[in-house]
Structures are given as C-alpha cells and as structure tokens.
Amino acid sequence: MHHRAPVSAMSVVCLAAISGGCHSFHDARFNDGNGASGESVLLVPFRESRRDRWYGESREGRGVVKFLRDWTEEQAVDAVFVESELAEEVLHQVLNWTKKDLRVADWVRIARPCGARYVIEGDILALELDNALSIGFYDPVATVRYRVIDLESGREVWSRDSWEIKLDERESQFQPTYEFENADKVRALFLAHIGSRLGEELYGYHE
C-alpha cells in the first residue's frame, strides 16, 4: 500500500522554481567552499566500530563509498579518486592496522606517498531500517562520523562527529518510498542516500 503525501503550496513553488531553472548552489564544507573538487582523494571504505569492523571489513562501509563514487559520476562533479598500486598498499596497511585508532599523523605518514591531496575516512556508528513508530513501511536512519585530512598541510580540515542522516521533508519529495519489500534492496537504497549526502558535503550541490 502506497501513501502519497499531500502536495503543499511550498512544494508547488519549489517545483516551479526547479522547472524554471532557478538552481541555488550550496558550497562544500571546506577548502573555501570548493571542497574536494578537482583535488585527488584517497577514499577509504568506512568502518563500523559498533560491530568491531575495521576499514574495508564492512559491507555497508564499502557501500557508502561505492555510492559516493556513483553520485559524483551522476552529478558530473570534478572528482579525482586515487587508484594505484600505492593506494592499494595504503588500504592494505590500514586493513591490517593493529592499534585501536588511526591518528591524523598516522594517516599523513602512510597515505602521503600515494599522491592524494585528501584522505576521506569515516565510521557508521548506527544504521537502522525501521523503528517502533514506523508501522507498515521502512524509516531508515543512520549516525555517521567522518573526517577529511589534508595530506599536504597534515591537518584535519573538516569533520562530522555524530551526523544523523535520514529522509527529511526536502528529500522525501524526491526519494523513493521505503515500503515493505526486500530489506537488502531498502538497505542499498539508503546507503546510496548516505553516499549522496556525503557527496553534497564534499563537493557542494545544486538545490
């Protein structure tokens, strides 16, 4: 059973503005609003510390960065991801890291040789597809933390410590309805949503 939300006057105005070509651009969150645009990036699969899964060991963490890549292609942003033997060696070192955490200085030391300007790494702290109040449909929500490390300056230039991601009023008008169906499909759709939100922060986006 599908539930169609009523169309508000504000929705009509927004749709009219979109069809008329009035697009406002929201800057990225770092690098003077340019974010990672045009810069080489080492994109690290997210971990899941709540499930004791390290970078590269989480299916959901790999999904987030995969869908981020897909989003950059769909949006035709100037995204440059480092893919080389050196980059693979860095990810291998990270996967086999024996300490509890990776400090900024650790990332700089092991990742700088691969030639990237930025390292982007994160952690899926929580991810639920439904809750006690969502009866008859999925209502996914995730809590994510991530950071951007500038390998040239050796500094963390942007971070989110506890970022709650869900379908808000703006997104629900354009995103698929999460009705009861295959849970894996719903999970994939929501991971794609997380990837797109991450892309908006890293590269900016048109409203």
Image (tube, helix red, strand yellow):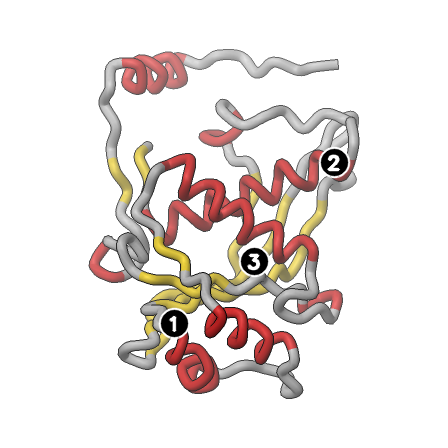
Q: Position of residue 60 (x, y in %)?
A: 66, 53
Q: Which residue is labeled 1 in the image?
A: 149
Secondary element type, mark 3: strand
Q: Which residue is labeled 3 in the image?
A: 144
Instruction: Mark 3 or mark 2: name the one nearer the start of the chain.
Output: 2
In the image, residue 206 above or below residue 123: above
Quarter of the picture containing the C terminus is top left
Q: Amino acid at mark 3?
A: Val
Q: Amino acid at mark 2?
A: Leu
Residue at 47%, 42% in the rendered image: 196
Residue at 72%, 25% in the rendered image: 179
Residue at 63%, 75% in the rendered image: 95
**Between marks 3 and 1 in the image, the one whose residue lies nearer the viewer:** 1
Q: Which residue is labeled 2 in the image?
A: 133
Residue at 75%, 14% in the rendered image: 1
Q: Quick check: 179 left or right of 154? A: right
Density class for disc 1 (Cα within 10 Å; few <14, some 14-19, many ≥20) is: many
**Between marks 3 and 2 in the image, the one whose residue lies nearer the viewer:** 3
In the image, residue 24 above or below residue 29: above
CA–CA distance between discs 2 and 1?
38 Å
